[in-house]
Image (cartoon, grey):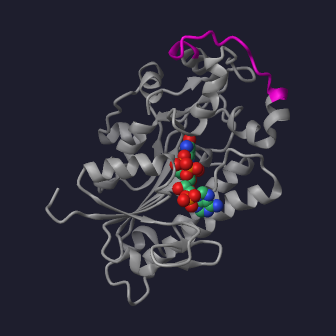
Amino acid sequence: MSAARPRIVLTGATGLVGRALTKALITRGYEVAPLRSRTQGPGGMDGASGWLDTSFLEGAHALIHLAGEPIAQRWTTAAKERILSSREKSTSLLAVDLAFPAPELRYPPKVFLSMSGINRYGIHRPGETLTESSAVSDEGFLGQVSAAWEKAATPEGAGSERGIRTVHLRTGMVLAASGGALKAMLPAFRAGLGGRVGSGCQQVSWIRLGDLVSMIIWALESPWVEGPLNAVAPHPVSQADFARALGRAVHRPAVIPAPAWAVKLLFGQMGAETLLADLAVVPVKALEGGFTWSTPTLTEALPVALGE
Ligand SMILES: NC(=O)c1ccc[n+]([C@@H]2O[C@H](COP(=O)([O-])OP(=O)(O)OC[C@H]3O[C@@H](n4cnc5c(N)ncnc54)[C@H](OP(=O)(O)O)[C@@H]3O)[C@@H](O)[C@H]2O)c1
């Protein structure tokens, strides 16, 4: 790393992934400049009103865009609108600014890493192994959100056509005890009330937080990585195996099943599209590109994730 620290503009810096990524980038010698979402003013952006402090991007090496309304909430009509528009509008605002910079933005970032989700492959793809070359799908609300998100990151005439290396981070379930799905599951599993969800046969594609952060930095530093990147561990597991492994990790039995109807009753469409989704996503680009996971298997990952 050179003496002048490359500046990385980061949205979503206050979130689960953003906090861990900020620390790792700084340790690696980068300067991190958090661009605050929902803020009209210096150092801020607001997708809803189209406000962006363009000058904040000046001279930055890369823009990493993570911000978005949390998915894990009851999907009322208003919540769905926030989930979709917080991603579509802010991503489009940033991507258009990078591709067609205002005259005062003389040195815009040339690397754009934009968060996405494995739901770019839809919700239910039983029996398939999904790689970056697999057909995408707009199935379900999350499929539509992911499609709109990625489309917004590459507006017509932008991306590589304008010399901007854009990566869509198609991220699986992020494992860390400090947030996200694992934090939500832990109380039940620690009380011995965990177990398989639905049939338990559906495939779960996951990545430990520390490995996700390493993969984002690897994508940042690998000029050949472009387009979709499956940000998952190399070994998806069935949901029943996931429940068993989590039970073992917290030293409790995990034999209390949650039927699909109960999941739908309790969590509605959100539960159906997350807990009952069936997506075996494999990170072929990262494997072929030489990325190494510190915890490639769930058995290795869970004990570490419980401390993250
Ligand atoms: N965690 C996972 O398992 C997972 C899996 C796949 C994809 N992802 C995606 O990765 C990104 C980061 O995940 P995370 O777990 O770090 O999320 P998180 O902890 O919920 O943080 C989300 C970030 O987005 C900002 N934000 C929240 N609501 C917003 C809104 N309505 N408009 C604009 N910004 C908003 C928050 O910043 P302020 O509150 O400071 O504005 C926060 O920094 C998200 O887009 C998420 O959908 C996460």
Camera-nearest residue between 148 and 190:
190
At x 66%, y 32%, the residue is 278
Q: Is residue 79 magenta?
A: no
Image height check: is 161 above or below 128? below
Residue 269 horizontal/vertical position (percent): 79, 42
> Which quadrant would residue 47 be assigned to in this image?
bottom right
Residue 301 horizontal/vertical position (percent): 44, 25
Q: Which residues are magenta?
A: 247-262
> Which quadrant would residue 91 be assigned to in this image?
bottom right
Camera-nearest residue between 41 and 68:
41
Image height check: is 171 above or below 81? above
- Taking the image as shown, residue 255 lies to the left or right of residue 286, namely right
At x 76%, y 37%, the residue is 272
Image height check: is 251 above or below 229? above
User: Which quadrant holds the C terminus?
Assistant: top left
- Res 283 visible: no
Residue 45 horizontal/vertical position (percent): 53, 73
State whether the magenta stretch is mostly helix, strand or loop. Answer: loop
Residue 186 horizontal/vertical position (percent): 60, 26
Image height check: is 232 above or below 193? below
At x 14%, y 62%, the residue is 3
- Res 206 visible: yes
Q: Check the image and name the residue furthest to the bottom.
A: 103
- Taking the image as shown, residue 126 lies to the left or right of residue 57, namely right
Camera-nearest residue between 227 and 82:
82
> Which quadrant would residue 185 be assigned to in this image?
top right
At x 80%, y 22%, the residue is 259
